[in-house]
Image (cartoon, rainbow, N blue to C red):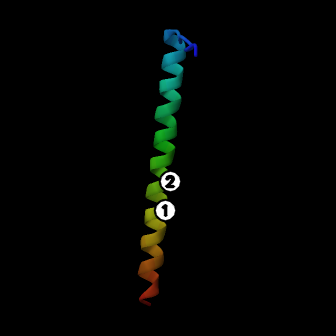
Amino acid sequence: METVKLNEAQKKSRRGRNIALGLVLAALVVLFYVVTLVKIGNMGQ
């Protein structure tokens, strides 16, 4: 099986996309966490 060699520009581009994806996933986790806290807090009323 052959592996594809990436040049520096492609590596930087891929790294940038990976970081952006990671940030989006982290933001979604925080959003779900906050929504869950708000829903649980409203149950007591």
Q: Residue at x 52, y 9 (%)?
A: 7
Looking at the picture, how far across and down is residue 17, in whole percent?
Answer: 53, 30
The residue beneath circle 1 is 32
Mark 2 residue element: helix
Count of all numbered marks drawn on residues in the image: 2
Looking at the picture, how far across and down is residue 3, in whole percent?
Answer: 55, 14
- Closest to the observer: 1 or 12? 1
Q: Find out whether the residues at labels 1 and 2 contact each other: C-beta distance under 8 Å.
A: yes
- Using the image, determine if residue 2 lies above or below residue 39: above
Mark 1 residue element: helix
Q: Which mark is residue 40?
A: none
The residue beneath circle 2 is 28
Q: Give the residue type that dot 2 points to.
A: Leu
Which quarter shows the N terminus? top right
- Looking at this view, name the residue that lies furthest to the bottom: 45
Label 1 Cα crowd, 10 Å radius (few <14 / some 14-19 / many 20+) = few
Q: Give the residue type that dot 1 points to.
A: Phe
Q: Residue at x 53, y 21 (%)?
A: 13
Looking at the picture, how far across and down is residue 24, in whole percent?
Answer: 51, 45
Between the C-alphas of marks 1 and 2, the distance is 6 Å
Q: Residue at x 44, y 90 (%)?
A: 45
- Using the image, determine if residue 31 lies above or below residue 16: below
- The image quadrant that residue 38 belongs to is bottom left
- Using the image, determine if residue 21 lies above or below residue 8: below
Label 2 Cα crowd, 10 Å radius (few <14 / some 14-19 / many 20+) = few
- Using the image, determine if residue 31 lies above or below residue 40: above
Q: Residue at x 48, y 59 (%)?
A: 31
